[in-house]
Image (cartoon, rainbow, N blue to C red):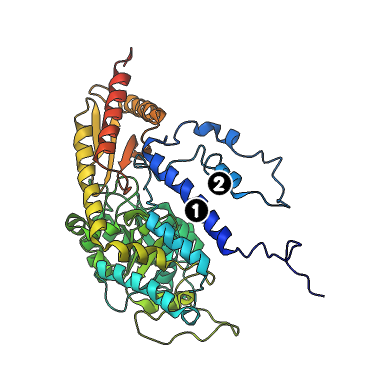
Amino acid sequence: MTRQATDGQGHHPLELDPQTLRAWTEKVLCHLEQYVAGLPHEPMGSVGQLGLAQRVPDPADPEPIPRTGMDMDTLLAEIFSTYLEGTYNTASGGYMGYIPGGGLLQSALADFITAAINRYVGVHVAAPRLAAMEAQVLRWFADLMEMPPETRGLLTTGGSLANFSAVVTARVAKLPEDFLDGVLYVSEHVHHSITKAAHLAGLPRRAVRSLPLDSAWRLDCDALEAAVGEDRAAGRRPFMVVGSGGTTQTGAVDDLRRLAEICAAEKLWLHVDAAYGGFFQLTRRGRQVLDGIKHADSITLDPHKGMFLPYGTGALLVRNGEDLRRAHAASADYMPAMQASDHPLVQDFCEYGPELSRDCRGLRVWLPLKLHGIQPFIASLDEKLDLARHAAEGLRAIPGMEILAEPALSVIAFRLRPAGKTDGAGDDLTRRLLERVQARDRIFMTATTLAGAYALRLCILSYRTHAERVEEALEIIRHEAEALLSLPGE
């Protein structure tokens, strides 16, 4: 006898009737409207981080799986209050820490559609038009980076997974199966996901060689050339260089043109981690800073940064798409036949990355671009470049403030170190300044270490960050710095 998944009254509760679907959707929309409207006034969530343990369930008493359901109103109230409490407010225009993500609402609508239609795009034949949509998005990105027609790629969950696939692809393309003597070159400021990717790709820790920076916080190209020569002489196999298209610490962009020349001469794979800065290529100033990126063998991009999309949207482009496929393709008897096509929009994504099961990611990029065109994105990125330069000038005007890294794109690194103060005293003052600014809970910024000095950094990238919020940030920093320096003994 077959059991029926009903509620005892002949209803199938997991299959929503149209009235319930509309009612629940409208309730969600009502909460989202209130949430977005309140963002300019909401705290940043930067206070009370040490009390996090008091704001999560007791791990010794976890909630058991629910046996019966609750009403939607109660659950939504819990989500938009309890579960958002104490979180970093990454959707706010005041969020200028780390590298802000976007959370564009147009992409949220796309994700709603994607989850509801639930199509599988890992193989082309399962959803040809939707797979082609993702391939089209990737072609747009490749054109933006001026990469050739044979370029292929995939949308990923973020830059970390894109960097992982890039390292694997370079290893397969440049090294034999016995690859433990391979060497990968990075700068001191490379994103840590590259080192992690190398380890996950099977390379020993000694394979990642960290090189010094030049005076502009970029990978020192002279040091790279010397290191390659040393490693070849020692019998090791140099195979890959990772350049940064905007570092997390300072926003610096490596000399990509010179790196490309070195890699061409030495037959090395050039990967550019442009997760943060790559989409500034849309702007005239960004193209100047990113000069040479078109010569990369692979590029990591994060649309959830420079295209303002929701977290979970990364991308990898590989100049020779066959290199990417060769590094990731696998087969099984139960799989359908893969596509043997050179058409740029015909692609089995399971053969180009580590995932077989994956969500349909193309719509969340395609929909906002088709709704608005590219011009609003360009204008917003230009606005961020302007705001970063304005913020740097404002910080420079604050007594005792030192700019450690001018904005190559939209990151500014600085510290509070009045004349006559030692580096140690400057570090202490800068830490205290961060605490005081965060306590205001109106802007969120983060810290790093530059050449041994404790530094603060503003990253202006949220599509909700505009001139008035940057002015507010400057006024808060100015006020707290002056108050701190006026204390007895300072």
Q: Quadrant of the N terminus?
A: bottom right
Taking 235 as reference, is 126 above or below it? below
Residue 399: quadrant of the picture: top left
Q: Nearer the viewer, residue 180 or 168?
A: 168
Taking 62 as reference, is 440 above or below it? above
Q: Position of residue 473 (x, y in %)?
A: 29, 33
Residue with the mark numbered 1: 26
Secondary structure state at the residue bearing disc 1: helix
Q: Earlier in the sequence, mark 1 or mark 2?
A: 1
From the viewer's perspective, is 51 left or right of 146?
right
| Disc assigned to residue 226 | none
Residue at 68 percent of width and 52 percent of height: 69
Q: Position of residue 345 (x, y in %)?
A: 36, 79
Q: Position of residue 233 (x, y in %)?
A: 34, 65
| Disc assigned to residue 76 | 2
Label 1 amino acid? Glu
Residue at 50 percent of width and 51 percent of height: 28
Taking 123 as reference, is 16 above or below it? above
Q: Position of residue 386 (x, y in %)?
A: 20, 45
